[in-house]
Image (cartoon, rainbow, N blue to C red):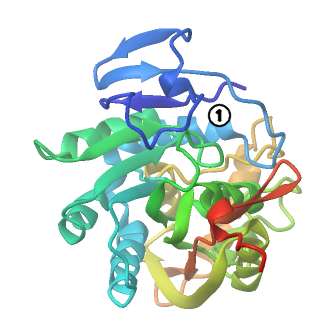
Amino acid sequence: MLHTCSIVGASASSDYLRHGCPCAAPNLARFADKTGNVIAMNLADNNAALRTTDVRRRFDRAAAQFDGVDFVHAVARDSLLARLDPIPIDARIIVDLGCATGSACRPLTKRFRRARIIAIDLSLRMLEQANKKRPWFTKTSAIQADATTVPLADHSVDLIYSNMLLPWIDEPASLFREVARVLRKDGVFLFATLGPDSLLELRNAWQGLDPSPHVNRFLDMHDIGDVAVRAGLRDPVLDVDRLTVTYQSAAAVLRDLTAMGGRNSLRHRRQSLIGKNRFRAMTDALNATKSDGIISLDLELVYGHCWGSGSFEGGGEIRIDATQIGRRR
């Protein structure tokens, strides 16, 4: 599997980049792209339940129309930004992790006027859309990378903002470990994701029709908190909100899921055609849930934030900031 880790339209000499990352390696092949210089590398296959190449391909295809169907992201974005208000932080380096088309970059820039914003996403096409929104003279960079292996230096970031990235991460522990590595001591990780009660209507519509998986798995907020603490982050705070999205038909549900890149990217999904009869049975089951002619999809929105501790787990070790070690008396 080929994963790209690249810089889009940004300098490769910034001191927040990780030493030895592909963005600084002179011996890697470079190619020109209309968005700027791109530097690519190979990363290892993680053999997880989501097929990362499919995730990237679906979001690449969805990028051009994503802003027209990003209402769930928009709700979560507004809630995340509101949750920043009581948090005491003066961020100078901010990462929008899983930035999609970069809709959060502008409000983050307005809130933290002296900050440099680093937008990171797996999809190059999403980053191209984000670049179109970037104002002149802004301190915003775009990097294409897997969120679990970002090319940033240890403890170099003050705030990591992540809206609806976790549903597309197979091993949340690997993401939280990377966040703990990159985040400064007392830096903040602010995120929104989906909880296990999300899209039950769609999951139930497939039940009994096809044994292959069709809907991503979503972690419970208590499990998320445990993962964050084990990764070396501290004081996680999580809460849940509910959002109901309504549709006129099953076809409209699937149309929106496709437009936002949310179709099935699970590794163990059926590889052959689903068949017209089985697909029609699924849409009939979804349409049968209508109340007053409306299909309602319930989403469990999980919001959380936690703090960098200056230590992180990696390679079988717990790494500790040497400045935290007191002198023996």
Q: Quadrant of residue 113?
A: bottom left
| For residue 9, side relative to residue 317 (left or right) | left
Which one is in front, 150 or 171? 150
| For residue 25, side relative to residue 120 (left or right) | right
The mark total stands at: 1
Residue 102 appears in the figure: no
Q: Position of residue 3 (x, y in %)?
A: 63, 29
Q: Residues within 10 Å of mark 1 (few under 14, many from 20)?
A: some
Above or below for 85 versus 70 = below
The quadrant of the image that shows the C terminus is bottom right
Residue located farthest toward the left when viewing the structure as drawn: 136
Which one is in front, 17 or 217? 17
The quadrant of the image that shows the N terminus is top right
The kind of residue on which mark 1 rests is Thr
Q: Quadrant of residue 298?
A: bottom right
Name the residue rendered at 69%, 77% in the picture. 200
Q: Position of residue 140 (x, y in %)?
A: 27, 46
Above or below for 60 versus 198 = above
| For residue 41, side relative to residue 275 (left or right) | left
Which one is in front, 162 or 87? 87
Name the residue rendered at 36%, 12% in the picture. 32
Name the residue rendered at 43%, 43% in the picture. 62
Name the residue rendered at 21%, 40% in the picture. 132
Which secondary structure lies at badge 1?
A: helix
Q: Quadrant of residue 171?
A: bottom right
Which one is in front, 125 or 117? 117
Q: Where is mark 1, residue-wise? A: 53
Q: Position of residue 18 (x, y in %)?
A: 54, 38
Residue 75 appears in the figure: yes
Q: Position of residue 280 (x, y in %)?
A: 67, 56
